[in-house]
Amino acid sequence: MSIPSSEPLLPEDENRLPPARRRRVRRSLLPAGGDERSAFLEQLAHQVTPGYEFFLFTFLAGVILGVAILLDSPAFYLLAVLFAPFLGPVLGLSLAVVVGSGRFFLKALGSLVIACMLIFGLCLLAGVIGKAFLPGSTLTLPVNFSLFSIPNFIVLAIGVGLANYMLVRSPRQKPLVASVAIAYELLLPLGVAGFSLSYGLPGSWVDGLIVFVVHLAWSALVGSMVLFLMGLKPANVFGYTLGSSIILISLIAVVLITGLMTSQPIVVATLPTPTHTLTWTSTAPAQPPATPTLTPSPPPPTQSPTATIQPTFTPTVTVTPQPTPVWARVFAPQSDGAIVREEPDGKALTSLLNGSLVQVISDPVKGNGNTLWVQVRTENGLVGWMVQALLATATPAPGW
């Protein structure tokens, strides 16, 4: 009979460990052994890998989102987010850093790309339908989802962080509630971009795509940071390379955000134009030098023509009573901006953020539903029509 030269080591008894090490083991969320760690990561990867139901519910969410944009209804926006599936591929982008597998990263990225194409395509179709049957509709909510907002970044960070924490804490359960916040911040800007492209909002679809890309990079960065803080470090060189790439892309996104935010016109201190007051004191000091020449000659009537020069300046004063330009700021309490249209209730030309400066160049005109419209000129020279109720005048004007 052969006697084995070695025996497998039995696991350490937790009761025999020192108190400090025993507390550390109890607080740890991850298995200590290498094989156990691999099995644990494999279980996490299985949870974030989508199945056929992921694409089915993505399709349903895209249909509802297109209807929500057409109806401009907050309730349908909420319904679309509730129908959105668990966005496991978004969490898979950060989990790929820990796993260190290029195949897993490409699988998560491919699933996410297919889902995004479904949302974008369905909302693109909704824009075609809206342009054909609902032309000139005043849509306010879609503009909000194509704008950068600090609260949106906070909500997305909380959703991604909570989803990763709950996934690691309970690998057998999917954090569906936290996924709702991720779907709200990712799918809605993407859907608005597709709708704006086909409906005819030239600026909103580009802004929506930029917001989606930046939010996606932000979610990958936050997810990687949460996993790192929980003790899940990259397993190989590929993981460190992928993590560095995510950090670099996120920094570029931060620079892009700050550049777009600082480019918005928010200064209104240049509204008063006091240049017309300079015409009253133009040539008054030119008369006194002629008076010293009057002392040798007694008759003063020779200097009387100098007094007749005053009426010659009166025609220049009559030019000053010009109509005072009416300046206004975009002020939409229910949204972050307003839309400039080609004509009242007509085709949308562009959108302006709250605080943007415009010049009112016409009297109010009634449109559909007794809505008052005014013609404005933007700082870029674009002339269009806006709803009067969404403007706050900075100079007094009749009828406001």
Image: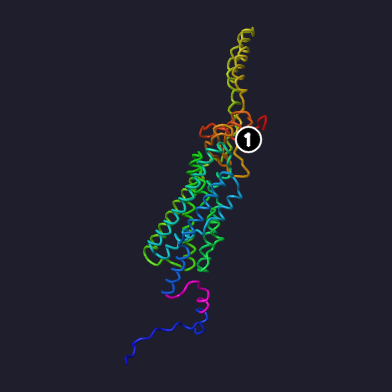
Image coordinates of residue 83 in percent, x first then y, are 55, 55
Side of 160 where 369 appears, left or right: right
Q: Residue shown at 44%/74% (left/top)? A: 36
Between residues 294 and 321, which one lies in front from this camera angle? 321
User: Is residue 54 shown above or below 310?
Assistant: below
255 in the magenta segment: no
Image coordinates of residue 129 in percent, x first then y, are 52, 41
Side of 22 where 272 appears, left or right: right
User: Is residue 258 shown above or below 2?
Assistant: above
Q: How many marks?
A: 1
Q: Which residue is mark 1?
A: 388
User: Is residue 307 shown above or below 265?
Assistant: above
Task: State which quarter of the image contains the C terminus.
Answer: top right
User: Is residue 66 shown above or below 46?
Assistant: above
Q: Give the residue at the far bottom of this rendering.
A: 1
Q: Residues within 10 Å of mark 1 (few under 14, many from 20)?
A: many
Q: How is the image coloured?
A: rainbow
Task: State which quarter of the image contains the N terminus.
Answer: bottom left
Q: Residue shown at 43%/68% (left/top)? A: 42
Image coordinates of residue 307 in percent, x first then y, are 63, 13
Between residues 87 and 37, which one lies in front from this camera angle? 87
Q: Give the residue at the far left of this rendering.
A: 2
Helix, strand or loop for disc 1? helix
Q: Tell me the magenta residue range.
A: 22-33
Q: Give the residue at the far right of this rendering.
A: 399
Between residues 255 and 70, which one lies in front from this camera angle? 70
The quarter holding residue 289 reads top right
Q: Residue shown at 43%/84% (left/top)? A: 10
Q: Residue shown at 32%/91% (left/top)? A: 2
Image coordinates of residue 173 in percent, x first then y, are 53, 67
What amino acid is found at the position of numbered circle 1 in the picture?
A: Gln
